[in-house]
Amino acid sequence: MERKQSGLGALARDLQAPIEQRRFGSGWFAGFFALLMAAAGFGLVVALRWPDWFATPELARLRDLPGFRLGVHGVLLGSYALALVSLLLRPAKVLGFTALGVGIAAALLGGANVRPEETASWGIFFGLDFFVVNLLVTGLMFAPVERLFPRKVDQRLFRVEWREDLFYYLVSSMMVQVLTFLAFAPSKAVVAHSGGFDGFRALVGGQPWIVQFIEIMVLTDLAQYWFHRAFHRVPFLWGFHAIHHSARSMDWLAGARMHFFEIVALRGVTALPMMTLGFAPSALQAYIAVVYIYSSLIHANLRGDFDRLGQWLVVPRFHHWHHGLEKEAIDVNFAIHFPWLDRMFGTYHFPEKRWPEGYGVPEKVPNGYRAQFAYPFRRRGGA
């Protein structure tokens, strides 16, 4: 047990190595991308081997594409090659050996040619493939952009608390079935008991697609605004939302830090206008895809004041003020998409050319997922 902790600690230290040890040609980048590709390949092989348990039905079409397994094979081969480069160049071998070990484990499971194994499914699945695809898409999109156009130049990719936030990302992705079931339950109940509105729903679904998409954006943001504001104003609810605000650094991964119960409640509230008014499924799917990317964007460590655009659309600087520690940043900027909602309800704060000095909450929120999960129920003054 001690060796395992020591190995994980050594891996974490190498990932967070000083910048002089991560320069190009040091083997760090080769080791990092080798580990990323090996982990992605391993996750996809597991999903292919046990689809009843670890694969989301919505991604079945992607997994059945002719080039999908070839792509998985290429990812694993790439991880082996980069791991060897890292082992050759880098004095510290932990990144290279870890990537090599994960890649070999994927190969032992069957690699890209693995066949589904019969499992006694209980009707419950964990979205491992969803986690891999989601993390790769958003990570490969934002991590390089944050390095090219950083707001805080000295903030590392593996900054303080990155392991906690990555675990939050894992939980929200792996528990996608449970979260979806709980979040959509109120909407399904409304639809089941409101058959008299079928004509209205047909009218909504018959509108031009782009009109439906914009309406979904506005209605869900209006619902989120008041939900968000309530979680700041009601002390017991704030205990849950304080977890999200406890992040002391802002980047694309920080948005994943959210208490499990708040995720269920938030998705349930936003699902009500989405699922009950008759919008076309394609418009709903497009909105969900945009939201995943948009949430990462507004938390990202990206420079750019965007004073004019920020009057109408939420930009990183606008949302960063919502996370600020300063007195002027308390209970402002609740909108997720449209700042004019904050102007309408008196909570707008977007000082020209200025950013918050720091992030977090004044109260002491514990570290670690388990402690943070229990925090809302244990904090003093939470009732």
Image (cartoon, rainbow, N blue to C red):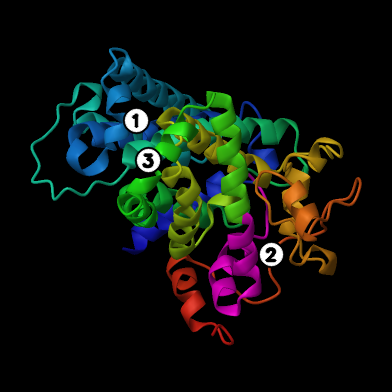
**Quadrant containing the C terminus in the rendered view:** bottom right
Q: Which residue is mark 2?
A: 360
Q: Which mark is residue 198?
A: 3
Q: Residues within 10 Å of mark 3 (few under 14, many from 20)?
A: some
- Ranked by sequence position, the earlier of labels 1 and 3 is 1
Instruction: Tell me, yes or no, whether the highlighted magenta stretch contains residue 250.
Output: yes
Q: Main secondary structure of the magenta part?
A: helix
Q: Secondary structure at mark 1?
A: helix
Q: What is the magenta range?
A: 225-252
Say which of 341 and 278 sits in front: 278
Specify whether residue 253 is in view.
no
Q: Which residue is mark 1?
A: 41
Q: Foreground mark, 2 or 3?
A: 3
The amino acid type of the residue labelled 1 equals Gly
Cα separation between marks 2 and 3:
46 Å
The amino acid type of the residue labelled 3 equals Asp
Where is residue 17? Give x, y as percent. 61, 46
Where is residue 37? Give x, y as percent. 42, 30
Q: Foreground mark, 1 or 3?
A: 3
